[in-house]
Image (cartoon, grey):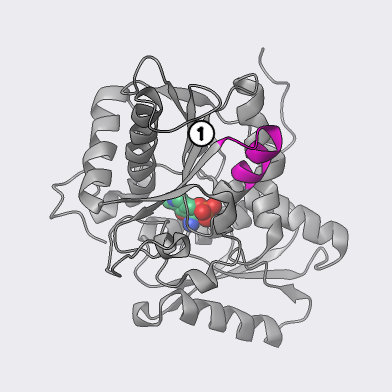
């Protein structure tokens, strides 16, 4: 059934398609939630809308006020879409290295973009965002890395959509972790439905989420964008006790897979989707081989955004020519 007309793009956030990953074993299908179908073309539209609506309700910010957020990009676009429709000014602090497409889109949506040096990392951007908010009247920093509304957005929207589509038959949830809001929202919902649901976090090789599960991991740079952490103490939403396993996927495997997904399955998705797909397919194979005991023979993952956002970085060139 076709939905009736929407009042604004904000009403079109969520309710994204869930599509089979065709490379999965027949006995254990893998389903990916295609988040590039959101109006700002990423999973972060969900938290942009959800966080701002709740913060307006609570009086943390009023119409005409300002939202200031340190962001690598997609969150800025998601917040900018919502802020524009909710009469809130948006200012984003973005480390220089992140994709120029994202920064152009934030500006096109009416937001102000301030760059901080790549060498200062996300930490530098966070510090600058708080300084800016101090200087402004009626300004709020949602801080997606520590705001429980981030996880709640996925618990309230992404997870119920998945469970409705699959009649509750979800054996495992596998998702990349940047802030970890997506995975934590899914995991919390999944464990309430069935405490045995297998939960798997995905990060690039060189990232340190695995250390929270007692796995030794050597820190290194990675090209996969949007997931991973160099300091898990800053990822306050990540709850290791809700996670059975952290899977580390190499940049090369994520890159091979995002290209395969385009060529063979018609998905124009980026590196964090490639990593999620490799991990989810691996979990499906292990469920099929009885190496993982899951309550249902199915795996759900999330494809957070689209490759179009990374064409300037040569995402479809050779692995070596793909820039981080
Ligand atoms: N992939 C991409 C491309 C992202 O921008 C993000 C958000 N940083 C994620 C995955 C991870 O989502 P989350 O922050 O909910 O863990």
90 versus 11 height, above or below: below
Query: Could you say which quadrant of the image residue 192 lies in?
Result: top right
Queried whether the magenta region covers residue 52, the answer comes back as no
Tell me if 189 is positioned left or right of 16 in this view: right
88 vs 126, nearest the viewer: 126
Give the residue displayed 73% in from the left and 57% down from the top: 52
At mark 1, the secondary structure is strand
196 versus 324 height, above or below: above
Tell me if 100 is positioned left or right of 234 in this view: left
Q: Residue furthest top?
A: 1
- The answer to whether residue 265 shows anywhere in this view is yes
Give the residue displayed 43% in from the left and 57% down from the top: 102
Query: Could you say which quadrant of the image residue 207 lies in?
Result: bottom left
Q: Give how far across and how far down residue 234 sits, in percent.
A: 53, 72
Q: Give how far across and how far down residue 306 sits, in percent.
A: 40, 42
Q: Main secondary structure of the magenta part?
A: helix
* Residue on which the image places disc 1: 172
Please provide the residue range marked out in magenta.
185-197
Whether the residue carrying mark 1 lies under 8 Å from ligand 1 is answered with: no
Q: Where's the C terminus, which quadrant?
A: bottom left
293 vs 314, nearest the viewer: 293
């Amino acid at each position: 059934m076709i939905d009736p007309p929407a009042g604004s793009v904000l009403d079109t956030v969520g309710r994204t398609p869930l599509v089979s990953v065709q490379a999965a074993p027949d006995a254990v299908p893998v389903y990916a939630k295609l988040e590039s179908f959101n109006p700002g073309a990423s999973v972060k539209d969900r938290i942009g809308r959800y966080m701002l609506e709740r913060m307006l309700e609570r009086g943390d910010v009023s119409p005409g006020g300002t939202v200031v957020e340190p962001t690598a990009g997609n969150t800025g676009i998601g917040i900018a879409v919502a802020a524009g429709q909710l009469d809130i000014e948006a200012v984003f602090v973005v480390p220089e290295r992140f994709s120029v497409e994202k920064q152009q889109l934030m500006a096109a949506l009416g937001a102000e973009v301030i760059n901080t040096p790549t060498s200062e990392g996300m930490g530098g951007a966070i510090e600058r965002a708080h300084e800016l908010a101090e200087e402004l009247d009626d300004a709020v920093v949602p801080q997606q890395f520590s705001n429980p509304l981030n996880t709640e957005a996925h618990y309230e929207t992404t997870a119920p959509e998945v469970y409705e589509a699959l009649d509750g038959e979800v054996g495992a949830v596998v998702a990349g972790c940047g802030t970890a809001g997506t995975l934590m929202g899914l995991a919390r919902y999944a464990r309430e439905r069935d405490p045995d649901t297998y939960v798997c976090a995905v990060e690039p090789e060189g990232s340190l989420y695995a250390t929270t599960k007692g796995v030794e991991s050597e820190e290194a740079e990675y090209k996969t964008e949007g997931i991973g952490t160099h300091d898990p103490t800053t990822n306050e939403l990540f709850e290791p006790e809700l996670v059975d396993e952290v899977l580390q996927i190499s940049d090369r495997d994520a890159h091979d897979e995002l290209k395969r997904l385009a060529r063979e399955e018609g998905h124009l998705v980026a590196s964090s989707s490639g990593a999620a797909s490799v991990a989810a397919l691996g979990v499906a194979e292990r469920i099929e081989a009885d190496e993982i005991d899951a309550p249902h023979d199915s795996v759900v993952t999330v494809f957070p955004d689209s490759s179009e956002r990374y064409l300037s970085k040569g995402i479809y060139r050779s692995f070596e020519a793909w820039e981080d």
